[in-house]
Image (tube, grey):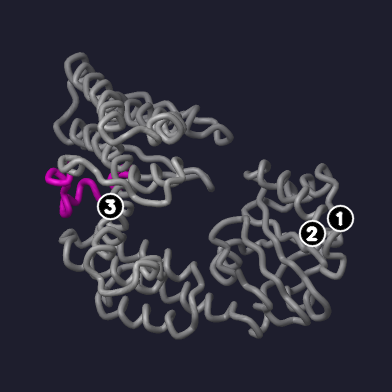
């Protein structure tokens, strides 16, 4: 199983010895336009079909199935699963594929089904607005008996990986509600819950790569919540104790350090940007005096650019004492200049970041909806 990407999109290709594949796609539509041809095309086109169907089904399952009671929900969900498994069997009859390819496709179907079952109690509570988690039938989680915690072939399969993240969170939350000697409202405590997940991964997961990936996911989830300094250090100490040899350790430590450097009263990171006139400046130069909001956008995400442009214009009217400065990421300079002009942005408040990865890591831009508030060259709110 291999992956390829065109930021912010990515997809998979399943390759076996002797395969010879051509990949055709439109980088704007990406998933929707992706077609494989050649030896090995059958299972890969089937996997893309499953992915696209799952994207479309999510709204149906969330809006129509999730409000149902558990038995009806399970019945509808299993109907979708059975249809897909039947199509896979038909593919195997018409164009025989290897056992490995068959199992990859089958796992994609099963773990997508399992993922929605893990989500059900929480989504159902939210959609019905009942405020409590409903009791589930005794057999609701029977599929967990078939879950593998150590098969290396599944580690990077997207439905499996997504399932495992939610599965660990579900087990931690439910176990914590029942077993932890704390008040009920503390179940949502960020430090307690994420530490609980670390211990569960340590006790449950045996596959080395899967362990490392799940430890990384929990660490990122916790660190990006920007908890207090004391809790932050407590979590990192426990993380290092349980996963000190993690292959993602350098990345996690970099994130930890970057978050520390974005706490209030720290200096604005001295990152270089370029103005529309070609003048090179740093964020320090821009934010030396007064109140500044740094926000982010990129060329490939024009829906976000349109939204944030409207939002900034509205905020400027309310907060006239702030300067709103846009930083463009993941876009070539010529394209950036075109977008600034076409969206009617003030060139004096727009800057281009050539070293995108350095910006993303230093300012912890985990998504483009993030902003950084600065006052007189000091961080006011880094998140």
Instruction: Please name the residue shown 37% across and 45% down the image.
Output: 3
Picture quarter with the C terminus:
bottom right
Seen as rendered, the residue at the extreme top is 94
Structural distance between the alpha carbons of marks 1 and 3: 47 Å
- The tag on residue 167 is 3
Structural distance between the alpha carbons of marks 3 and 2: 42 Å
- The reply to whether the magenta stretch includes residue 152 is yes
Q: Is residue 276 left or right of residue 67?
A: right
8 over 24 or under it: above or below: below
The stretch in magenta equals 143-160
Residue contact at pointers 1 and 3, CB within 8 angstroms: no
In the rendered structure, which disc, 1 or 3, sits on the residue that comes first in sequence? 3
189 over 313 or under it: above or below: below
Residue 4 place in picture, x, y as percent: 42, 44
Front of the two marks 3 and 2: 3
Structural distance between the alpha carbons of marks 2 and 1: 7 Å
In the rendered structure, which disc, 3 or 2, sits on the residue that comes first in sequence? 3
88 over 167 or under it: above or below: above
Residue 204 place in picture, x, y as percent: 17, 62
- The tag on residue 346 is 1
Q: Label 2 belongs to which residue? A: 350
Residue 191 falls in image quadrant: bottom left
């Amino acid at each position: 199983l291999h992956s390829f990407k065109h930021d912010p999109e990515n997809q998979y290709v399943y390759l076996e010895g002797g395969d010879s594949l051509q990949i055709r796609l439109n980088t704007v539509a990406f998933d929707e336009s992706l077609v494989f041809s050649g030896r090995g095309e059958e299972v890969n086109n089937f996997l893309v079909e499953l992915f696209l169907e799952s994207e479309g089904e999510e709204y149906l399952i969330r809006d129509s199935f999730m409000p149902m009671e558990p038995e009806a929900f399970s019945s509808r969900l299993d109907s979708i699963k059975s249809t897909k498994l039947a199509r896979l069997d038909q593919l195997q009859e018409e164009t025989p594929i290897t056992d490995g390819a068959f199992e990859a496709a089958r796992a994609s179907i099963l773990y997508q089904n399992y993922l929605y079952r893990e989500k059900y109690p929480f989504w159902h509570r939210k959609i019905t607005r009942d405020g409590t988690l409903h009791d589930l039938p005794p057999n609701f989680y029977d599929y967990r008996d078939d879950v593998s915690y150590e098969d290396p072939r599944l580690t990077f399969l997207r439905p499996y990986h997504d399932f495992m993240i939610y599965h660990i969170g579900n087990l931690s939350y439910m176990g914590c509600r029942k077993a932890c000697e704390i008040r009920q409202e503390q179940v949502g405590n960020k430090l307690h819950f994420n530490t609980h997940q670390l211990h569960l991964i340590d006790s449950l997961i045996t596959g080395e790569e899967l362990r490392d990936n799940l430890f990384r996911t929990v660490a990122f989830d916790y660190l990006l919540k920007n908890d207090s300094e004391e809790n932050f250090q407590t979590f990192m100490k426990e993380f290092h104790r349980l996963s000190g040899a993690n292959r993602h350790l350098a990345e996690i430590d970099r994130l930890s350090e970057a978050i520390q450097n974005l706490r209030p009263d720290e200096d604005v990171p001295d990152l270089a940007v370029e103005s529309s006139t070609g003048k090179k400046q740093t964020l320090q130069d821009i934010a030396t005096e007064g109140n500044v909001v740094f926000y982010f956008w990129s060329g490939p995400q024009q829906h976000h650019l349109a939204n944030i442009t409207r939002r900034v214009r509205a905020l400027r009217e309310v907060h006239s004492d702030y300067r709103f400065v846009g930083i463009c990421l993941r876009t070539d300079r010529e394209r950036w200049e075109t977008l600034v002009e076409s969206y009617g942005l003030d060139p004096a408040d727009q800057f281009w970041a050539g070293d995108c990865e350095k910006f993303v890591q230093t300012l912890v831009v985990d998504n483009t909806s993030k902003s950084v508030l600065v006052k007189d060259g000091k961080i006011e709110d880094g998140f």
